[in-house]
Amino acid sequence: MSRCIFCGYCELACPFDAITLGNEYELAEYDRDDQIYTKDMLLAEPIKRVPVADAELYDTPIPYYRAHS
């Protein structure tokens, strides 16, 4: 974590929502070894996805010229 500048680019580039940034940004420690995080320490709660009301509506392509003629 000593090289992170909290820009958020890694969060935007991650295609699987595996990287999330939180509100805790002050990471002051007295010992350098305390700055090493394990995998369990870095895990965040998964983002809850809400299903689409009518998935068939969005999965079926509708040609533009038929819908707007």
Image (cartoon, grey):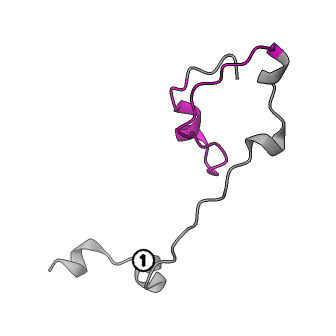
Q: Relative to 20, is 1 on the left or the right?
A: right
At horizontal 56% and vertical 20% (from top left) the residue drawn is 5
Which quadrant does the C terminus fall into?
bottom left
Asked if residue 35 is positioned above or below residue 19 in the image, the reply reads above
At horizontal 61% and vertical 42% (from top left) the residue drawn is 14
Q: Where is residue 25 in the image (x, y as percent from the top left)?
A: 56, 29
At horizontal 53% and vertical 31% (from top left) the residue drawn is 9
Q: Relative to 23, is 40 on the left or the right?
A: right
Q: Position of residue 41 (x, y in %)?
A: 78, 41
Q: Which amino acid does label 1 sit on?
A: Tyr
Work out whether residue 26 or residue 49 is closer to the camera in this orientation and state it: 26
Work out whether residue 7 or residue 27 is closer to the camera in this orientation and state it: 27
Q: Relative to 59, is 11 on the left or the right?
A: right
Which quadrant does the N terminus fall into?
top right
At horizontal 46% and vertical 85% (from top left) the residue drawn is 56
User: Residue under circle 1?
Assistant: 58
Q: What is the secondary structure assignment of the residue under circle 1?
A: helix
Splitting the image into 4 quarters, where does residue 3 fall? top right
Magenta stretch: residue 29 in it? yes
Q: Position of residue 68 (x, y in %)?
A: 17, 77
Magenta stretch: residue 20 in it? yes
Splitting the image into 4 quarters, where does residue 39 fall? top right
Over which residues does the magenta segment extend? 6-32
User: How would you rate the neighbour count of disc 1 (Cα within 10 Å): few for under 14, some for 14-19, many for 20 or more?
Assistant: few
